[in-house]
Amino acid sequence: MTNIEVGVKSRIDDPNLWPHVIRVLEYLKSKGLNVKIDANMPLKGYNYFKLKDEEVSSLDLLIVIGGDGTLLYTLSHLSRNVPPIMTVRWGRYGFLMEIEINEFQYYFEKYLKGEYKIKEASRIIGYYRNTNLPPALNEYLLIANRGGIVKLELYKDNIRVFRMTGDGVIVASTTGSTAYSLSSGGPIIDEDLDVFTVTPLNPIQLYLRPVVLPITSTLKVNILDDTVVHVIVDGVERGFIRKGDTLVLKRYDRIKFIRFKDDYYNRILRRNVM
């Protein structure tokens, strides 16, 4: 089990984290592992990798240290053949991050012994016109220009699900059901289910409620009026669409997460008391 190549990607904007990262790296080296770090990490004496598919795909394990933003940023640069990911929490917000930084050695010993589970999480991919968008672990958000509202309709395959006028719509994965969608009135989806959750944002049609759809569906969002609609993928604006445009959304790949705890609902509770 020690003949493995491990990559480490860390949050880089908090100097208080660096002593902990160095301890993690020195511990991994003490285990005789081939350790590489992300090229943006300002540390010397290590081999580097860039956040590109061809460089990350050769890793046996990717360790991400930071908060949810660090993980989402990392995955936004990776399209295919992502290695299993171990998430290490640093900072206040880290619902997606499983173990604390001070627990790392304890749980990595368990990893070396094979005492862990693999949890898979589907991502969402989208495109419109000739624009291919990056995959999202959490959600695609379509929101009207500041101060405006948008008229749109949602199709599941070739069946219209609803037409609405409001601020926009969130299309979330199972993982994303506990993020922006939950804050906007969407349901909590159990992590063993693999679905889309579509949550209308402030619709004027008061009967409209979030809809849960099969992840195998192809979803289409048609814009019906002249409002500029921003397309935000896991918190980052990636473009805009307007009348006549259709955003197509599908399931992409599944990310494999190394899990040691069965604490999905406890982590949701922790998020809500932050």
Image (tube, rainbow, N blue to C red):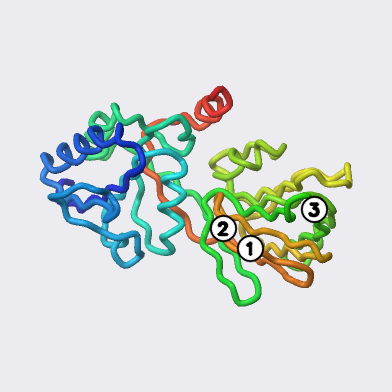
Along the line of sight, the residue nearer the viewer: 111 or 28:
28
> Residue 46: where, in percent of width, then height?
16, 51
What whole-number distance in Å separates the C-alpha atoms at marks 1 and 2? Answer: 7 Å
Residue that badge 2 annotates: 124
Instruction: Report, in whole angstroms, how far the alpha carbon at label 1 lies from the one at label 3.
Output: 24 Å
Marks 2 and 3 in Cβ contact (< 8 Å): no
For numbered disc 2, what is the local secondary structure?
Answer: strand
Q: Residues within 10 Å of mark 3 (few under 14, many from 20)?
A: few
Instruction: Say what secondary structure mark 1 lies in.
Output: strand
Residue 148: assigned label: 3
The answer to whether 221 appears left or right of 30 in the picture is right
Residue in the image at 13% along x and 43% along y:
29
Which residue is at 45% across, 31% downward?
A: 262
Identify the amino acid type marked 3.
Gly
Along the horizontal axis of the image, is 206 left or right of 233?
right
Decide: marks 1, 2 in contact (CB < 8 A)?
yes
Q: Tell me which numbered mark, 2 or 3, is placed earlier along the sequence.
A: 2
Helix or strand or loop: what does disc 3 sit on? Answer: loop
The three-letter amino acid code for the residue at tag 2 is: Ile
Q: Residue furthest bottom?
A: 130
Q: Quadrant of residue 23?
A: top left
Q: CA distance from mark 2 to mark 3?
A: 26 Å
Q: Which percent across, then down, holds residue 45?
A: 12, 50
Query: Where is residue 164, by image quadrant?
Result: bottom right
**Mark in front: 2 vs 3:** 3
What amino acid type is highlighted by mark number 1? Leu
Q: Going 34% across and 59% down the picture, which residue do you hit?
A: 51
Which tag, 1 or 3, sits closer to the chain's start? 3
Q: Is residue 55 left or right of residue 169?
A: left
Q: Which residue is mark 1?
A: 249
Tell me: residue 179, above or below residue 238. Answer: above
